[in-house]
Image (spheres, rainbow, N blue to C red):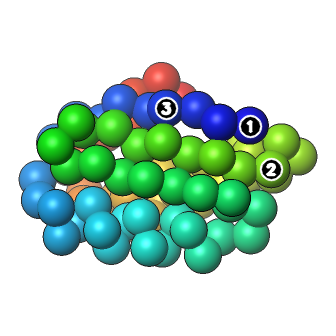
Amino acid sequence: MKKIFEVEDLDCAHCAAKIEKAVSQLEGVNEVTVSFLTQKITLDAQDDKFDAVVKEMVKIAKKTEPDMEILGI
């Protein structure tokens, strides 16, 4: 399953890269892209693990960038 999430308050490209790297290492993730410029996260993960990956992605994002909000969850 592939989904694009809009984000708010992602403040720097370095944080985007840290989030992308951490999420890409989660079990079930096929591909993830976190874009500081477009303020979007594109997540492609296995269907049966998608919800669990999204929950972990939110935790990783909050830990890395506490003010960031992921919309559409």
Q: Are marks 1 and 2 in contact (CB under 8 Å)?
A: yes
Q: Secondary structure at mark 3?
A: strand
Q: Earlier in the sequence, mark 3 or mark 2?
A: 3
**In this rendering, position of residue 43 left or right of residue 5:** right
Screen quadrant of the N terminus: top right
Q: Are marks 3 and 2 in contact (CB under 8 Å)?
A: no
Q: For the point 48% across and 42% down, which residue is it?
A: 42
**In this rendering, position of residue 60 left or right of residue 63:** right
Q: Secondary structure at mark 2?
A: loop
In depth, the one of 32 and 53 nearer the eye is 32
**Disc 3 to disc 1, how far (Cα)?**
10 Å
Label 3 amino acid? Ile
Q: For the point 64% across and 46% down, which residue is it?
A: 44
Name the residue that disc number 1 marks.
1
Label 1 amino acid? Met
* Residue 68 locus on image (x, y percent): 25, 47
Q: Is residue 60 above or below residue 67?
A: below
| Disc ID at residue 46 | 2
* Residue 5 locus on image (x, y percent): 44, 33
**Disc 1 to disc 2, how far (Cα)?**
6 Å
Examine the rendering and report whether any part of residue 64 can be seen. no
Name the residue that disc number 3 marks.
4
Q: For the point 33% across and 73% down, which residue is it?
A: 18
Residue extending farthest to the right is: 48
